[in-house]
Amino acid sequence: MKWGTRLAPLAVPLAAAWAALAAPPLLAESPLPFPRTETREPCARRDPLRRPFFGDLHVHTALSFDAFGQGTLARPDDAYRYAQGEAIGIQPYGRDGRPLRHIQIRRPLDFAAVTDHSELLGETQICQLEALEGYDSTVCRVMRRFPKLGYMLVNGLMYSDETPERLSFCIDRGASCRDAARGPWQEIQEAAEAHYDRSADCRFTTFVGYEWSGMPGGDNIHRNVLFRNAIVQGAPTNYIDTPTQEGLWQALEAECLAAGNGCDALAIPHNSNVSGGRLFTTTRPDGAPITAEDARTRARLERLVEVTQHKGDSECRPGGPDELCDYEKLRYPRMMDMVTVRTPPQDLPPRIYVREVLSEGLVQEQRIGVNPFRFGLIGASDTHFAAPGMVDEDTFVGHAAGTVDARFGVPAYPDRPDFNPGGLGVLWAEENSRDALFEAMRRGEAYGTSGPRMTVRFFGGWDYTPQWCQEPDAAQRAAQGYAQGVPMGGTLLDPPADAATRAPRFALWAQRDLGGADTPSTPLQRIQIVKGWLVAGEPHEQVYDVAGERDGAADVDLATCTPRGRGFDSLCSVWTDPEFDPTAPAFYYARVVENPSCRWNTWVCNARGVDCARPDSVPDDLRRCCDPEVPKTIQERAWTSPIWYAPRGGGRDAAQLGASEGGAVR
Amino acid sequence: MSVRASRWLLFLVLALAMPVPMWGPFGAFVPAVRYAILFAAGLAVAWAEGTAGPVPGILLLFGAHALVAAGLAGLVAWGGGRALAPLAPRTRGFVVGGACAALLLLALLVDLYRTPFGRAPANNLLGILS
C-alpha cells in the first residue's frame, strides 16, 4: 500500500489542520467582510452592521516645524497617550523645562493619526539635535533662541513661493535634510505601532501618516496621507521635493499602491476654504483640462475631505440662501492672507467650499465620465500641540496652545476669534482595527462632526418606508438600511422596475451626544438633507429640513451656557426627494444640527467674569469678548458623506468605483 | 557728571532696559535693544535664506520698533538731562547714577518684560539679552 493511498482519507483534515497551524489565527476564523492585510489578534467584538468609531486624523507634534516653533515639545508618543486618556504637559514651559499646563481628554478616542508636516521634518530634527550638521546654522540658532520668530520667517520663506527650496544648511542638494528626516519618520511609525492595540480588545487604532503641505503662492493645497498598515513609504513625500498635487499622487502610486508590498494609502485634502480655489483643480499643471485618467487617480486616492477643523469650516459658501453656511467661516480665501491681509476680500474664488466641489464633480463626470471629486466628509482638529480630539468648546486653548501674540504664555483669549476647536472624524466599521477603519474611509462610510459625538445613520435606496423609523430594534433598523440601499458614501443607480417609488428615498437616524458628567452636551434641533444636482450641465443645490424643527424653540443662556428650550434626543426620517429628475446626476448628504450652545469665546469670557456692560472693567487682553462681530453661540453639527445618484447612461465609472467597494445599488 | 554725559548714560540705560510696547498683533513689551536683537536675527536669516514672502515686513516691523524705542529712550534722556541741568555736576551724577542703577536693578530682579519671541512668556533683563 502506498503511503499516498493510506493517507488519502486523512488528506483533507490534515490539510485543514496544517492550514490552521500555518496561517495566522485571523485567517482561520469566519470570513471577514474586508481584506485583512496585517497580523493581529481578531477583535473580540465584531459587528457586521458596523459601529461608529470616533477619532482625529489630523494631529501635529513637535516634529512639525511650525508646532515646534510655536512652543510645542510634545511628541507623537504624547499625542497617542493623550488620545487614550492620559494627561500630557503642554506649553508654556518654565525655565526648568517643565510644562506649566497639563491637559487630559474627557472621553478617549477610538483612533488617531499623527500627521506631522513632511516638509522640514529633517530640518526640525537638525535644529534640535546638536550632533547633526546644520545645528549651528543661522536658522537653527534663531529657531532655538527665538522660536516664534524662526517659525514666522521660515514659514514665510517656505510657503510664499510656487517652488520652495531647501534651507541653506541642507547640504548635498538637500540630502542631509532628507537623511535627517529618517529619524522622525521612524519615530512616527514606532509611536503608531506602540499604541496600536493589536490585542482582541481592539481598544485603540493608530495610523501612520504625514501631511504634505503644499502652499503655492500662499494657497493651501494640503493633504494628509494615511497608510492602511505598517507598510509605508520609505520617506514621506514633501512639498519641497514634490511641489504639485499630481506629484504627490504619482509618488503614492509608485512608492505605495503599485509597490507590490502590501502598502496602501489615502490622501485627505483639507482647508479648501483657504486654498484660493487651488485644492480642487480641474486643469493639469500645464493648463489643459484633466482627463478621465487624472480623475480616476484623484478619486482613487482622495476618498475623504476634511470639512471642518481649527482653521474654519469648508462646507459651503456663506451669504447665500442656506443660512447655516454662515458658520465658523474664515473670511480669507488664501492661507497666507490670514497673516498678511487686514481687509478681507469681497469676492471669494470658486471651488473653495466642499459643496460646490461636489457639484463640480458632477460637471466633470458629465464631461469625462469620471467624478474626480467623489469624496466623503470627515472632521478633524489640526491640533498643533499633540492633543487629538481636544474639540470641546469649553476647553479650547488655541490652535497651537496659544494665540499668535502669546504663544509662550497662557493667553486670556486663547486664539484668533475666527479659529475654533475643530472636529472629529467618525467611521462606520465592523471593528476597531486598521483594516476595518481604512475600508470605511475608502468606501466613504464616514461623517464629520464639529466636536460632539452624535451618531448618524444615513442610507439611500428605493424601498424604504416610514416604518423604518418605527423599528424599535436599532440592529434591525441598520440591517434594513443596508439590505434595501446604500450607506453614506455609496451610489444609487437608476431605480429597478419594481421599485416602490421612482424617486430615491433616504433613511436618516441621528442620536444626540449625551455628553458625560463633566462634558456639556446639547439636544438636536433638526436634520437636513443637502441635495446638489445638474440641470443642463449647470449645478443647482437645495437644502431640505427633514426632521426636527427650525430655529426658535431653543436657545442658550449666555451667562451660564445652559441650553434652554425644546430639543431632541434623537431624530429619524425617511425622506423622498420631491423634485427628483431621473436624468440628472445628483448627490445628497445629511446635516445634523444641534440647538444653539455657547461658542468657545463665551466660555472663556464667562470664566474670566467679563462684563461688557461695564467696558472699563474689561481687561485689554479680553476686549474681544465684547466684539459684536464675534458670534457668542454656535450650532454644533455633523455632516455625513454624500450618497450619489448616477442616472442611466452617465456616471457608470464612478458608480462602479462605489460598487467595487460595496456601495452601489440598482 | 556733565549734562552731555548724563544724557548719554541715561540714553544707554533706557535703551537697554526701558520697555516699549510693540504695536500690532504681537504684544511684546521690551526695550530698544531687544528689538534691535530681533531685527538682527531676522536680518541674519534673510541674509542666509532670502527675503521671500513676509520676511521684509517682519524686518521692517522690528527695525521700526528698534528705531522708535531708541528714539523714545533718546527723548527721555534728553528731557532728563535738561531737567537735571541746573543741578551741580556731582549731584547730577548721583541722581543719574541712582536712577540708572535703580532701573537696572529692577530690570534684573523682576520679570519686567513680555517676550513672545523668546522661550518664556515673561523675563528679566538677563533673560531678554541672553
Image (cartoon, coloured by chain):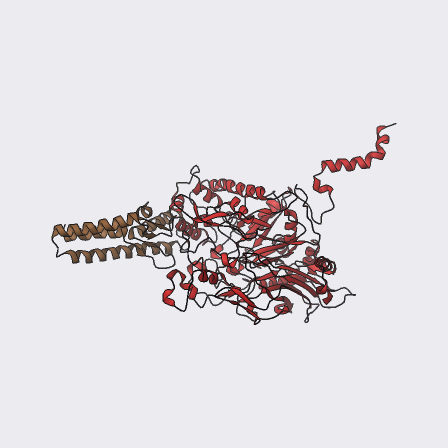
- Measured as percent of width and height from the top left, residue B76 is found at 22, 57
Tell me the colour chain B is drawn in.
Answer: brown
For residue A268, above or below residue A503: above
- Measured as percent of width and height from the top left, residue A530 is found at 62, 66
Horizontal side of A151 relative to B81 (left or right) equals: right
Q: Quadrant of residue A325?
A: bottom right
Residue under the image location 58 percent in, 53 percent down = A268
Horizontal side of B107 relative to A158 (left or right) equals: left
Q: Residue furthest front?
A: A517
Horizontal side of A325 relative to A164 (left or right) equals: right
Q: Residue furthest top?
A: A1
- Measured as percent of width and height from the top left, residue A595 is found at 57, 66
Horizontal side of A15 relative to A514 (left or right) equals: right
Q: Is residue A515 visible?
A: yes
In the foreground, A133 or A443 = A443
| Quadrant housing the C terminus of chain A | bottom right
In the foreground, A208 or B27 = B27
User: Number of labelled discs?
Assistant: 0
Q: Residue furthest right?
A: A1
Q: Quadrant of residue A290?
A: bottom right
Q: Is residue A276 visible?
A: no
In the foreground, A598 or B65 = A598
Chain given the colour red? A
For residue B78, above or below residue A190: below
- Measured as percent of width and height from the top left, residue A405 is found at 40, 56
For residue A199, above or below residue A216: above
| Quadrant housing the N terminus of chain A | top right
For residue A230, above or below residue A566: above
